[in-house]
Image (tube, helix red, strand yellow):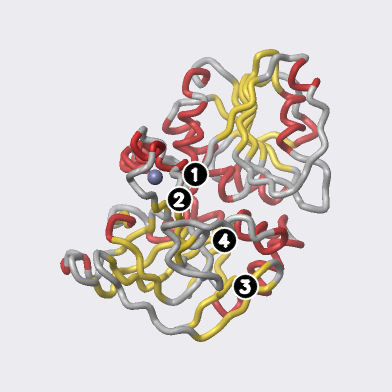
Amino acid sequence: MKALRFYNQRDIRLEDVDKPMPGDGEVLIKVTHSGISQTQVNEFMEGPYLINAISNPLTEEPTPLIPGHEFGGVIESVGPNADPRLVGVPVAVLPRKNCGECEQCASGHENLCQNLNYYGLVGAHGGFAEYAAVSAKNIYPVGAIDTSLYSFIEPLLVGVNAGRQIEDRIQGSKILVLGAGGVGVCVAAVLKDYFGGDVTISDILPFRLQKAGELGLKTLNQADLVCEYDVVVDCAGSDPASQNAALFEGAEYLKPTGILLMLGSYFHELSFVPFSLLAKQIQLRTSFAYDSYAESKLDEVLETLEPDFNVLIHEISLDEIIDEGYFRSEVDKNGFVRIVVRP
Ligand SMILES: [Zn+2]
């Protein structure tokens, strides 16, 4: 089958590899939708930071890894000890694989598992391929929703985890989400529709802001932002060539005692003046991936969501993934919101 393989920084190759066989308890998915997230682009530009960069007892696959952690498709076959009735079922992949035995897993923080794996990102092949074999524990049947939403399931779970980190401050607060890429709009939509927050989203890229508006989100240009927010959520991340980061810029828009919630992945050093946080007694919080609680709320979240995420999607083929996916993501962020690969 055709698959993209990550070898190293700026070294990804579209290759012919063996079609995977579903192992014990696994299902084989014919991938139909696979989103390119900024994290994957950062891995390509600055990494590897997550893609098999750490020694991990759960890591089954050495580099080169097939990236892509926001994907889904239709189950084509099942391995031993997986339910044969799953064949033909459309599913999104829940990419987090945790050990279930460490202290973090035992306390419900599976996203912080000491042996964390993630399909398409850490230790297990992902969705930039025609097929992917994943554990039957890591699938979510999406029969009731539009199949094009497969690649939004993981960012929506990330949004639930983010909401949990600021749950004590959502009611009565003004919340600003910085960054209207795929993750930013999902986080904003979950905070608004599921958690009932008063949410505004902003981006320096006009096309992305326009699309966020089409989703029904309240938008503001960066130039119009003022210091009036109780919570700022950074979903922007930053370019490795830039010292500017939405993360610390966000502190400018926070009222005293506000919360700065970090979601964007930064893999490089940034310069900032810590007094900008201290002088307003700002709390810095972080939200990483998602835990089992977020998974348990996924049905409810999908029921409450109002936006039609289809307006965000720019589809490309697997053959185009290097030029029209990764390279374009690096240089032309204003031309799209979410690139979805259709193998
Ligand atoms: Zn664990």
Relative image position of residue 30 (x, y in whole percent): 36, 73
Quadrant for ligand 1 reads top left
Amino acid type of the residue that numbered disc 3 sits on in the rendered structure: Tyr
Residue 7: numbered disc: 3
Q: Which residue is mark 1?
A: 289
Q: Nearer the viewer, mark 2 or mark 1?
A: 2
Q: Which residue is mark 2?
A: 116
SS type, badge 2: loop
Amino acid type of the residue that numbered disc 2 sits on in the rendered structure: Leu
SS type, badge 1: loop
**Tag 2 near tag 1, CB within 8 Å:** yes
Q: Which residue is mark 4?
A: 51
Relative image position of residue 282 (x, y in whole percent): 68, 19
Q: Who comes first in sequence, dot 2 or dot 1?
A: 2
Residue at horizontal 58 percent and vertical 62 percent from the top:
339
Q: Who comes first in sequence, dot 3 or dot 2?
A: 3
